[in-house]
Amino acid sequence: STISRVMVDDRFVCFGLEDEYREEKIVGETRIPAGFYKVGLRTEGGFHSRYQQRFSDIHQGMLHILDVPGFEWILIHCGNTDKDTMGCLLVGSQAITNPGDMAITSSTAAYKRFYPMVAPAAGNGDLSIRFVDNDR
């Protein structure tokens, strides 16, 4: 797994969790490549329907990381371990960094804090995310 810091306007908001780095992509098992990507709102699919009910007071669509080479349907959502990610970025309030057993916790609380900060910009087409490899 990969643990990261999720920042908004250079301020720490929460932790992120993704799959591990791989030179050759394995579907659902490889972290997002370093780079700068636009983020939009996806308003179809199973995640959108579930989050529309689960977060009815804030949900406008799934945060969807766009145009990542070799990847499709990368979302930012709740989850705790690499088993929850399938190539997406998970958010959590705390990080457990045990080698071989990394996780994040309090994911729902982190999502409720993070999502309203960025969803309006994503809806306007004004949101970008940068992934940096500090271990490469």
Image (cartoon, rainbow, N blue to C red):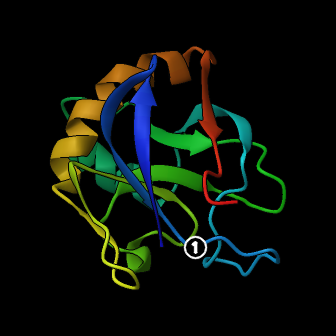
Q: Is residue 131 above or below residue 11?
A: below
Kindly identify the residue that appears in the image at 51 percent across and 16 percent down. Answer: 121
Residue 8: x percent and y percent?
A: 42, 24
Depth check, front residue: 19 or 76: 19
Depth check, front residue: 98 or 112: 98
Which residue type does callout 1 highlight?
A: Glu
Decide if residue 24 is on the left or right side of residue 78. right
Q: Is residue 104 above or below residue 14?
A: below
Residue 77: x percent and y percent?
A: 39, 52
Kindly identify the residue that appears in the image at 61 percent across and 77 percent down. Answer: 28
Q: Is residue 19 above or below residue 36?
A: below
Decide if residue 16 is on the left or right side of residue 74. left
Q: Residue furthest front?
A: 135
Please identify the quarter of the rendering in which residue 124 is found. Answer: top right
Residue 127: x percent and y percent?
A: 58, 22
Kindly identify the residue that appears in the image at 83 percent across and 62 percent down. Answer: 70
Residue 11: x percent and y percent?
A: 37, 22
Secondary structure found at label 1? loop
Local crowd size for mark 1, using a 10 Å CA cut-off: few (<14), some (14–19), many (≥20): some
Q: Residue furthest bottom?
A: 100
Decide if residue 134 is on the left or right side of residue 101. right
Quarter that holds the C terminus: bottom right
Number of numbered callouts drawn: 1
Q: Is residue 8 above or below residue 36?
A: above
Kindly identify the residue that appears in the image at 30 percent across and 70 percent down. Answer: 103
Depth check, front residue: 11 or 111: 11
Return the residue at label 1.
20
Please identify the quarter of the rendering in which residue 83 is found. Answer: bottom left
Please identify the quarter of the rendering in which residue 31 is found. Answer: bottom right
